[in-house]
Structures are given as structure tokens and as C-alpha cells.
Amino acid sequence: MCQTLMVNHIDDFCLWAPPSPNSTIGDTEQEEVAWCSKNGWGTRLIPAGALQGVQVLKTSMYIQFAGFVDQTQLDLAAGDYGGELDPHGADLRGNPLGGLVYSNAFPSNNGNNNSFQQVMDWNSFIGGNQFCFTICDPSTSSADQSMYCQNTYDEIGCTYNMPNNAQNGTFEVCDADLKTPVGLYVTNGATMTYTQPYTGVASPPYTPIVPSSSNCVTYHSTDLYTNLPSPTGASSATSTGSSGSSGSSGSGTKSSSAAGSTPTSNSAVAIGVSSVAGILGTLFAMAFLS
């Protein structure tokens, strides 16, 4: 039940996902646990073959992971279009509660793989068999971290929060330019700000632009993810490290909702998925609790 993530490199990163099979993000966002691609962190392990494509974009302010995953192997229900997870949450206690993220990947860490920095600002989406995760460099200003790891645009998913060119079947690491922060766009030469509405369907008036990338290095998945368990019995697979404690559940004021679930009296209708090249077409379903 460990709730500490390590997000280091393409061969060594973790995702938030439920602790019990056939769950939805909307029902479990405060209790997600760490699922990692490498053993030794005291977490559950992402089963072999579950990661089906990963792109890592390294920038001067943040590192962004995006890709494709068989989410049923991480205890998500097959039809769940998921939602957002972040260290803030509507009640400022984070989703999941007590969730921590560490990394040794930033230049300020001086390439020391045995020393880890706590990532204070991060943002993550998972659902619809896709995921994206941004960690902001803790050595940058708090304003930059808040801007590039924004967490208030939860209805528009990876499409707008983390534009990328991730492809199913491709595993690559690239240098990249900075993205335009979510919500900002230029029209007729003027920079405008789109604010997500508190109720109703979000319809941004602009199309996100994928930042330019270079120096891409491509890998084979079999070279990256070794010693992972088979998909059978994946929900109980753990690494050789020590177990972390479970986060307590609680009620917040805002939650994601799985597409296809029956809306309750305090839920909004879920948003579906539009598939286009890479991960750009994903819209994650979110709802707001009263």
C-alpha cells in the first residue's frame, strides 16, 4: 500500500493506480498506491507488457512522461476514463492523501542516482488506457512549478495539460521545448486565458500545440522493464523493498468520475474519449462533488 512514487527515467518510474482490482479513479483517487516499473522501491510492480508505449520529454523546467498502458493490469476497470491526481486536491490534502513523489532526474541533482529530491509540484492523469505525468524541477521558482504543473484544468486531461507525441509501441526519451502552460493561448496576436468552468462540459477555444523535441533516443521495451511479474495475479505483486503504509480515505469536495458509470445526484455526466494520433485526443472524465 506504499504511496511514495519514484519518477526518475524511462526505465524507472511509477504511476498512481488503485489498490484493488476493477476500480475507478473517481472512487479511489484519495487512496491510490504506487505501481512502479522497477523493483526495490517497496511498491507494487507494473506487470510485464502493461506499458505499451512511453515518451519522456525533458525540459529546463520539468520532465514529462506520457504513454499507453493496459490499465486493467493496474487494477483500473477496463472502461474507466480516469481523471487527475495531484498533490493539492480540492481540500489541499492531495489525491492520493499522503502521496509523495521523489526523483533523481533533475540537473540540480548533479547526476547522483543515489540522492533523491522531493518533487513538490506534479500532475498526473490516468485512464482510457493512457497516462501522463509531469514532475516540476524543485530547484525552479514556485511560480514556474505552479505554472507547468498546473492542476486546475482537470476536465481536459493530457490533451491540454501535457501535449505530446507519444505513440503506442514506441519508447523514447527526447529533449523538448517548454509547453505553453495549460489555459494560455494566442489569438489575433493577444495572449488569452481560458478558465475551466466549475460546472458543465469544458470546451477550450483553442487547440494545444505539442512542443518541439530533439535528440530523441528510442529503446526496446524489453531492454527497459526487466524482472517484472507476469500479468497473472498482478494486483498482489510487490517488490523486494519494504511496504509503505496505506493512506487513509476521506471525503473531498472534488472527484473524478469514470465514463460509463451511473451518475449520482451529485455527479456530472462523464466526458468520453476522442482518439487521434498519440495521446492528444484523450479527454478524461471528471465530475464535481457538491
Image (cartoon, helix red, strand yellow):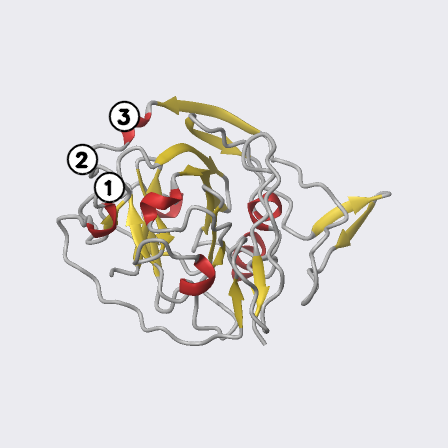
Residue 192 or 71: which is nearer the viewer? 71
Q: Residue at x 54, y 62 (%)?
A: 262
Type of amino acid at the residue the image marks with label 1: Lys
Question: Dot 1 lies on which element?
Answer: loop
Q: Is residue 133 left or right of residue 286?
A: left
The answer to which of marks 1 and 2 sits earlier in the sequence is 1
Q: Is residue 5 left or right of residue 285?
A: left
Q: Is residue 150 left or right of residue 68?
A: right
The residue where tag 1 is placed is: 38
Type of amino acid at the residue the image marks with label 3: Thr
The answer to which of marks 2 and 3 sits earlier in the sequence is 3
Residue 19 falls in image quadrant: bottom left
Type of amino acid at the residue the image marks with label 2: Asn
Against 4, is 223 above or below? above
Question: Dot 2 lies on which element?
Answer: loop
Against 267, is 78 above or below? above
The residue where tag 3 is placed is: 222
**Which quadrant holds the N terminus?**
bottom left
Q: How busy is the neighbourhood of tag 3: few (under 14 within 10 Å), some, or many (20 plus)?
A: few
C-alpha span from label 3 to label 1: 13 Å
Q: How busy is the neighbourhood of tag 1: few (under 14 within 10 Å), some, or many (20 plus)?
A: many
The answer to which of marks 3 and 1 sits earlier in the sequence is 1
Residue 38 percent coordinates (x, y):
24, 41
Q: Which mark is residue 227?
A: 2
Residue 199 percent coordinates (x, y):
68, 66
Marks 1,2: beta carbons within 8 A: yes
